[in-house]
Amino acid sequence: MPLTSTQGEVAAALRAADPAAPEALAIFDRIAGAAHPTPDFIEWSAQLTGACDAARLTYYFDAARQGEAGLRAVGGRFAALGDALGAAVPPALLEAFSALVPGRREVQQLVLGLDDRPGGARRVKLYVVLQEAAEGLVDGLIAAAGARRPEALDAAKVYILGLDCGAAGISDAKLYFRLDRARLGRVVSNLREVSDLVKGTREVVLQRCLLSDRSQIYLHATDAHTIAGYLARRAWGDAATAQLNARHRAAAAHLAHGRLEPWIISFGLRDHQLQWDASNVYYHHTGVG
């Protein structure tokens, strides 16, 4: 169901919990969270890389409910976010989006996102979640973004295509693939250190970045307690995680509807090793509708 009863509440709670939160959160919510079409789902996330960067919001729009007109409107909001937040969205990308995405049965969701990091490295994001293979759509958007898909990465297996824009234009293009649990041990060699998370994982996703030398592994939990318990233990020896837990409690206290629950955690992947100092935590606004 659309979140008409709680529009703006998550962004407002984040700003109330952190007086230093950037104004970009409110600008993003005003543009991406406007009515007609109203977002179907809201996600807050934080990046832990020695510090807690928590000015990150993501709004999801379901293709089946929004229809072609709704998806075109989401594309227009992406352009408007670029104008309002100083991100240079290439016209070629907007043209490719308009030609390739609205009305396609392969598209499950469109996603608008904001990552406003300290130091001005702000990004606005457009992600396309697929429910069927859509090689032409994937390759068309990648080309419009000025990136190239390596032949080793099968476009037919792409689950999500992510495009990030910053002040200089496209900052990265990302491909996400569902990873067979049976293969996880061959891809990652240090799983024992997060065995509790792995046991509570229902789905594993591999991310490959095309314009930067980065990969990530995403663990989607079977329940919110799995990641919450891990974060509680990690906070004993990590100040950034302790700060995130405190920020989460403060934001949750300002919500009048629903809960912010941790359902996904990611880690950087390098040389088959999960990188503990490069992780993201994703909180879903649940219990609303």
Image (cartoon, rainbow, N blue to C red):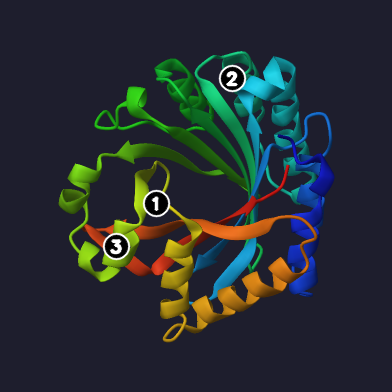
Disc 2 secondary structure class: loop
Give whichever of 40, 280 is nearer the camera. Answer: 40
Disc 1 secondary structure class: strand
**Circle number at residue 274:** 3
| 21 horizontally vs 126: left or right | right
| 150 horizontally vs 160: left or right | left
Q: Position of residue 146 (x, y in %)?
A: 49, 32
Tag 1: amino acid: Tyr
Whether tag 3 and tag 1 are in contact, CB under 8 A, the answer is: no
Position of the C terminus by quadrant: top right
Q: Which residue is mark 2?
A: 101
Q: Position of residue 6 (x, y in %)?
A: 80, 49
Disc 3 secondary structure class: strand
Whether tag 2 and tag 1 are in contact, CB under 8 A, the answer is: no
Please say whether residue 25 is visible from this viewpoint. no
| Residue located at (64% from left, 46% from top) | 113
Indicate which disc, 3 or 1, sits on the residue closer to the N terminus: 1
Q: Which residue is mark 1?
A: 218
Indicate which disc, 3 or 2, sits on the residue closer to the N terminus: 2
In the depicted structure, whether residue 150 falls above or below residue 132: below
Distance between the alpha carbons at the discs numbered 3 and 1: 10 Å
